Amino acid sequence: MTRMHNPPHPGETLKEDVLPALGLTVTQAAEQLGVSRVALSRVLNGRAAISADMAIRLSQWLGGNPEVWLREQLQYDLWHAMQKSTVKVRPAEGVSAA
C-alpha cells in the first residue's frame, strides 16, 4: 500500500467530486444507494467510515470495485492512527524486523 500524506476521508471524495458531477443532492444519492440520508451524510462529513456494505453499494452504484473504497478508508484510518500512536511494542523474539 502506498502511503500518502494526510489522505482524504473517502466521504470527501463523494461529497466534493461524485455528487456534484452527478448533480445529486445528499437525499437523492441516499435514496439511490438505499441508505438513510443521515447515514450517507455521516460518511460524507467524515463522521462514519465506509463499511464493507457501503463499499459494495458504491461500487454497484458508480461501477468499479468495492475494494477501492475500502482501501481509501484503510489509508485514511491508518494514517490517522499512526499520527496518534504512542505505542511501542518490542518485536517478538526470533523475528527479524522487516
Image (cartoon, grey):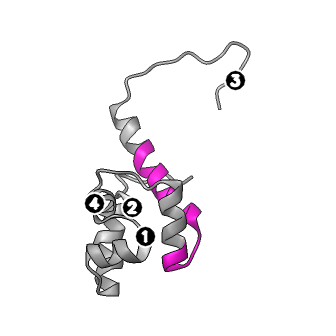
Q: In the rendering, at what x and y percent does residue 40 appear?
A: 33, 63
Q: Give the SS element for disc 3.
A: loop
Image marks 2 and 3: residues in contact by CB distance under 8 Å: no
Of the residues shown, which amino acid type is indicated by label 3?
Answer: Ser
Q: Which residue is mark 4?
A: 38
Question: In whole angstroms, how far apart are the C-alphas of marks 1 and 2?
Answer: 18 Å
Q: Earlier in the sequence, mark 3 or mark 4?
A: 4
Residue labelled with disc 1: 34
Q: Residues within 10 Å of mark 1 (few under 14, many from 20)?
A: few
What's the amino acid at mark 2? Pro
SS state under label 1: loop
In the rendered image, residue 80, in percent from the top left (x then y), is placed at: 36, 42
**What stretch of residues is rendered in magenta?**
60-78
Q: Is residue 78 above or below residue 23?
A: above
Quarter of the rendering containing residue 42: bottom left
What is the C-alpha distance between the residues marked 3 and 4?
47 Å
Q: Earlier in the sequence, mark 2 or mark 3?
A: 2
Is residue 68 on the magenta stretch? yes
User: What is the distance, in whole Å, between disc 2 and disc 3 at their CAs?
Assistant: 35 Å
